[in-house]
Image (tube, grey):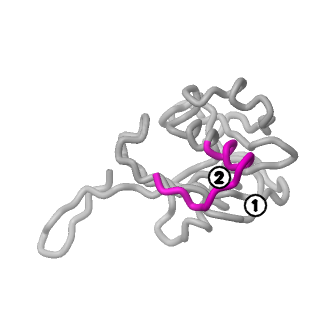
């Protein structure tokens, strides 16, 4: 939660904005293993992070993708907006903007927020990375994406 002081001394507790990237290439999804010391450290997740003050969500998701994986990418669609204040293991009550990203090329190295980066085969994704073992609610998002791949539905989803 963010505590802000407004005009006349009024305060409010506000929520953070975060972005998540769904990146598919050759029948695989790009996942990162969160570094120890981070919330949900040691768990696999979608590339994700906080929106910086002076950037759009589109700019943020491309930046976070590059920082955590070394991959450059282009936003193709806004997939999902998660506004649930009771997201699993998220005491900050983040609001998440989940994007579909087309990968371009790996031109960098992952930063210290990721201890591993992998392209997980979609065919065995739910078996190899069960939804309840992934960081936060990323497993739920990946399950929705797998359904979307089979039978597309209107985007974005509001949850």
Q: Nearer the viewer, residue 30 or 76?
A: 76
- CA–CA distance in space, label 2 to label 1: 10 Å
Residue at image mark 1: 73
Q: Is 146 a magenta residue?
A: yes
Q: Is residue 94 above or below residue 90?
A: below
According to the picture, the residue beneath numbered tag 2 turns out to be 21
x and y percentages locating residue 47 in the rendered image: 64, 47
Total number of numbered discs in the rendering = 2
Looking at the picture, tell me which residue is in the foreground, 145 or 95. 145
Going from N to C along the chain, the mark reached first, 2 or 1, is 2
* Element on which disc 2 rests: strand
* Quadrant assignment, res 128: top right
- For the record, the magenta segment spans 144-159
Q: Position of residue 140 (x, y in %)?
A: 56, 39
Q: Position of residue 25 (x, y in %)?
A: 83, 49
Q: Are marks 2 and 1 in contact (CB under 8 Å)?
A: yes
Disc 1, SS: strand
The image position of residue 31, as x and y in percent, is 70, 40
Callout 2: 10 Å neighbours few (<14), some, many (20+)?
Answer: many
Q: Residue furthest right?
A: 26
Residue at 57% of width from left, 26% of height from top?
Answer: 133
Relative to the observer, which residue lies in front, 152 or 68?
A: 152
Asked whether residue 153 is drawn in magenta, I would say yes
């Amino acid at each position: 939660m963010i505590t802000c002081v407004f005009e006349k001394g009024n305060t409010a507790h506000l929520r953070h904005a975060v972005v998540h990237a769904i990146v598919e290439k050759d029948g695989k999804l790009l996942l990162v293993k969160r570094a120890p010391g981070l919330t949900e450290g040691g768990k696999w997740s979608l590339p994700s992070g906080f929106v910086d003050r002076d950037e759009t969500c589109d700019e943020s998701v491309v930046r976070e993708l590059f920082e955590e994986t070394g991959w450059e990418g282009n936003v193709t669609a806004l997939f999902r907006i998660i506004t649930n204040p009771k997201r699993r293991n998220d005491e900050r009550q983040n609001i998440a903007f989940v994007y579909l990203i087309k990968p371009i090329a790996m031109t960098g190295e992952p930063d210290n927020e990721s201890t591993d980066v992998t392209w997980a085969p979609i065919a065995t994704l739910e078996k190899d990375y069960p939804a309840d073992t992934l960081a936060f609610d990323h497993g739920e998002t990946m399950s929705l994406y797998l359904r979307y791949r089979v039978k597309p539905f209107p985007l974005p989803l509001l949850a």
